[in-house]
Image (cartoon, coloured by chain):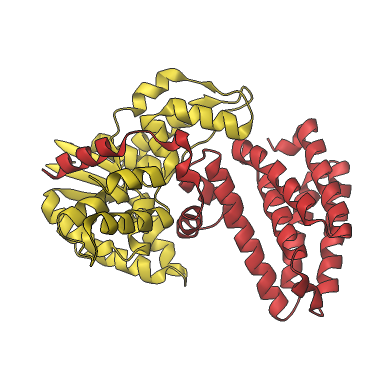
Chain colours: A red, B yellow
């Protein structure tokens, strides 16, 4: 069962999308990041494609909107209009509980990048890829294994390994499960 | 499957070594170990078959393939028994923590196949080489994993504590400990004092995804 079939989850996602629409109008990158983080908890538990797709899309938008140099590209306004149109449609379809079309609208946001030309297309595609890796790292941080996270986000373990290596995830005290001296001694005994 | 000794590598541990250009340590380490270095088909699929198609990691994938071709890494082929054991362990792992609404799907088939192989290998000495944190926590400190899930998800977690015992039999090491041993056995040679060399090696594994803390590294350099 999709989480969108639960009324409280549907309302939560509607709230996120309405705030996303508002943030896009006012270029509010902080609000976009906050909305993206709100979906990570849900995505970690439910592994629902809708939560994951929203977390990635909203985070990517926060990065894209934050780059003033992107707005100088001639394709920028066309891209932004398409994104806004797809978000409006997604809100509309979710309000009507039309889940199938809602998923199509979410895909269309990402496809908006494919429909533009020039370097902006490459930049935006890179941002979406980076957003996938960033959200994967957040889900891994929540206690879900790396391979499971990679499966959910459609990235590779190589990409996630490089990314999580730069985070403080292993330094969290709960991550320490055995004194290193003990583990090294165990390894030495394996080699005896 | 019989071996005098066995190390079973999860994908992450091989990835850490490959990204640090340390795959070369596996051949001399295997000689020093005197046993088998296994990977499962599922792990091979992730780090070789799928990665060969990616431009960014194709070289690393080919270098791992070369280790397989040379017989340094042995692929444990998936049998019916192994598939059943993987499914059984996956089922236990993913029915260990409940949010009161649903079970949390913690781990994936790839990692689980390493646990299944660990159970199926008849060896005097054996361990799984796992760099990622969740599986290690599940095996060694499931109570910590419960606390982490509660903290991060901001939800009360109800564990099936009888499952904790099932996982405590799995022995886990990381690529960082293997690299440490490789240094001590002079397989890795660096123009630095021992403490600095160990720090350099262990931080390199950490920055390429091995879940080892700064504090652990600072202790290890003195060992």
Q: Viewed as shown, does residue A6 lie left or right of B127?
A: right
Q: Position of residue B31 (x, y in %)?
A: 12, 55
Query: Is residue B8 in view?
Result: yes
Q: Residue furthest top?
A: B162
**Residue B17 appears in which quarter of the rendering?**
bottom left
Residue closer to the observer: A170 or B43: A170
Q: Residue at x 65, y 38 (%)?
A: A41
Q: Position of residue B48 (x, y in %)?
A: 37, 62
Q: Viewed as shown, does residue B108 lie left or right of A105?
A: left
Q: Position of residue B206 (x, y in %)?
A: 40, 53
Q: Residue at x 31, y 57 (%)?
A: B201
Residue closer to the observer: A30 or A94: A30
Residue closer to the observer: B75 or A173: A173
Q: Position of residue B173 (x, y in %)?
A: 29, 42
Identify the image quadrant of the N terminus of chain B: top left
Query: Is residue B72 in view?
Result: no
């Amino acid at each position: 069962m999709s989480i969108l079939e639960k009324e409280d989850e549907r309302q939560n996602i509607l709230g996120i999308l309405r705030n996303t629409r508002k943030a896009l109008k006012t270029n509010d990158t902080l609000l976009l990041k906050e909305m993206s983080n709100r979906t990570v908890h849900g995505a970690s538990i439910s592994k629902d494609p809708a939560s994951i797709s929203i977390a990635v899309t909203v985070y990517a938008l926060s990065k894209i909107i934050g780059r003033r140099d992107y707005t100088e590209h001639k394709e920028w306004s066309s891209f932004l209009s398409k994104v806004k149109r797809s978000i409006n449609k997604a809100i509309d379809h979710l309000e009507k509980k039309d889940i199938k079309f809602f998923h199509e609208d979410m895909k269309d946001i990402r496809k908006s990048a494919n429909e533009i030309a020039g370097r902006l297309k490459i930049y935006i595609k890179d941002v979406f890829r980076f957003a996938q890796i960033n959200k994967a790292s957040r889900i891994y941080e929540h206690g879900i294994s790396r391979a499971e996270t990679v499966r959910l986000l459609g990235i590779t373990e190589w990409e996630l390994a490089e990314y999580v290596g730069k985070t403080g995830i292993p330094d969290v005290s709960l991550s320490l499960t055995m004194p290193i001296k003990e583990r090294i001694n165990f390894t030495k005994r394996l080699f005896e | 499957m019989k071996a005098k000794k066995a190390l079973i590598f999860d994908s992450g541990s091989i990835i850490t070594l490959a990204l640090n250009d340390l795959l070369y340590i596996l051949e001399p380490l295997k000689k020093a170990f005197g046993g088998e270095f296994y990977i499962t088909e599922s792990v091979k699929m992730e780090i070789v078959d799928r990665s060969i198609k990616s431009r960014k990691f194709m070289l690393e994938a080919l270098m791992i393939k070369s280790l397989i071709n040379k017989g340094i890494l042995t692929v444990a082929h998936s049998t019916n028994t192994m598939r059943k054991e993987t499914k059984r362990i996956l089922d236990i792992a993913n029915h260990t923590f409940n949010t009161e609404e649903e079970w949390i799907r913690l781990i994936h088939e790839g990692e689980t196949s390493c646990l299944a192989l660990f159970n199926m290998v008849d060896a005097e000495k054996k361990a799984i080489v796992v760099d990622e944190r969740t599986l290690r926590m599940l095996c060694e400190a499931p109570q910590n994993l419960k606390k982490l899930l509660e903290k991060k998800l901001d939800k009360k977690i109800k564990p099936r504590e009888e499952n904790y015992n099932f996982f405590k039999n799995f022995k886990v090491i990381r690529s960082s400990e293997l690299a440490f041993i490789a240094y001590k056995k002079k397989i890795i040679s660096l123009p630095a004092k021992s403490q600095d060399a160990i720090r350099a090696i262990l931080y390199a594994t950490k920055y390429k995804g091995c879940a080892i803390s700064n504090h652990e590294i600072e202790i290890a350099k003195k060992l």
